[in-house]
Amino acid sequence: MRMPPTWVRRILLAPFVIVAALAMLALTPIWLLVALALTSLVPGRFRLPRVLWLVTVYLLWDAMLVLALFGLWIASGFGYALRRPGFVTAHYRLGAWALRLLFWIFGGVLRLTITTTGSDETDAATGRAAFDELFAPGTPLVVASRHGGPGDSFILIHTLLNEVARRPRIVLKYTLQWDPAIDILLHRIPARFIVPSGFGRVPRGGGVRVEEALAELARDLGPEDAYVIFPEGGNISPARRLSRIQRLRDAGRETMAERAEALRHVMAPQPGGVHAALDAAPDADVVFIAHTGLDRLVTLRDIWRELPMDKGITMRAWRVPRAEIPDDLDARAAWLFDWFARIDDWIDEHPELG
């Protein structure tokens, strides 16, 4: 799907979300009464009122963020100083506060809890301390995360901003620009919207141009920064998984294809983006992220069935020092695959967390 030009998104989409939020809020008594009346016809634990309330909250959250971003634009001299460090920091702080608010509300309505650990020990305090230590400032990080389940990217960015005080540089799918708040905010901090198309050496679309954009994002990565990438390229699905395996076979990598077939919870990672980041940030360590708790939420029907979720999301991190990362590209691609196989094994070993 082709994105409309930036000026169209700013002039039409941003005001639209504000109008939609105000309309949804004004109609709250009506839709709430209708939703409660229909609850007896819709099986579940007040699913319809919960969904409508969350839609209203998200629209209000998005509209509030758009207005705050507009205020920062005015304060910067109508955009003149937006790229200056002080205003970039202000945008990070605004994003951190907005995510804290969003997770406070959504966590309460959906009954979600998030546990972070950097250890295989069962003690929660020990695991949390180990997690924080993995993200200690002083060294730039490339954060390579598993991608699975709704909202996992929001959870990761929230954790980086609000739990370990890292400033994320985010690689994300271009379609997220349809959300006005995300679109505006992430065009004012270091981020790249890309069209996932693999990382083959092709002159247009993905390939070289994508890798160049991702390398540019990683340049001058600072000691408090975290370059965030999802090497799978998207949430796992049967069609995407089979396509990835077939592409490995078409490239003559039969051994890798067979290993990809053995993966149960993740897909074979695409190495191009990680290569680009590590080459552009030669001092960066890598932190791998696994998580579980959202694995069975693949389709809208799955999400509807699970409402309210009553889920505990566990996020596991491992840090790899730069000295242990291969320099040869083929060896590094195999190393990345090995780590995603390890992530797959960790998820398989913790079914109680799913």
Image: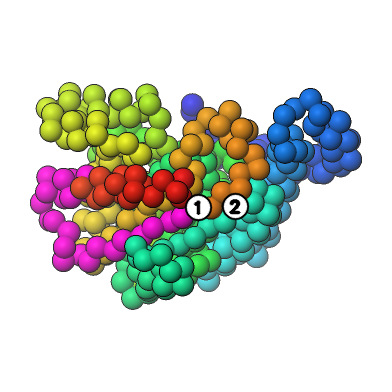
Magenta span covers which residues?
314-337
Mark 1 crowdedness (10 Å alpha carbons): few <14, some 14-19, many ≥20 = many
Q: Secondary structure at mark 1?
A: strand
Q: What is the quadrant of residue 267 in the picture?
A: top left
Mark 2 crowdedness (10 Å alpha carbons): few <14, some 14-19, many ≥20 = some
Q: Residue at the spot x=57%, y=59% of the render?
A: 95
Q: Residue at the spot x=43%, y=56% of the render?
A: 315
Can the viewer see residue 83?
no
Horizontally, is 129 left or right of 62 in the view?
Answer: left
Q: Is 328 included in the stretch rendered in magenta?
A: yes
Horizontally, is 100 left or right of 34 in the view?
Answer: left
Can the viewer see residue 92?
yes
Q: Residue 107's x, y, as percent?
A: 63, 54
Find residue 59 and name its label. Answer: none
Q: Is 301 included in the stretch rendered in magenta?
A: no
Q: Earlier in the sequence, mark 2 or mark 1?
A: 2
Q: Disc 2 to disc 1, how far (Cα)?
A: 7 Å
Q: What is the quadrant of residue 33 in the picture?
A: top right
Find residue 112 and name its label. Answer: 2
Q: Amino acid at mark 1?
A: Ile
Decide which of 335, 19 is in the foreground and name it: 335
Decide which of 201, 299 is in the foreground and name it: 299
Decide which of 317, 333 is in the foreground and name it: 317
Query: Number of labelled discs?
Result: 2
Find residue 313 and name its label. Answer: 1
Q: Residue at the spot x=29%, y=34% of the render?
A: 198
Horizontally, is 162 left or right of 131 in the view?
Answer: right
**Compared to 199, does 82 lie above or below?**
below
Q: Secondary structure at mark 2?
A: strand
Q: Amino acid at mark 2?
A: Leu
Q: Residue 290's x, y, as percent?
A: 37, 52
Q: Do the residues bearing badges 2 and 1 touch, measured as CB atoms within 8 Å?
A: yes
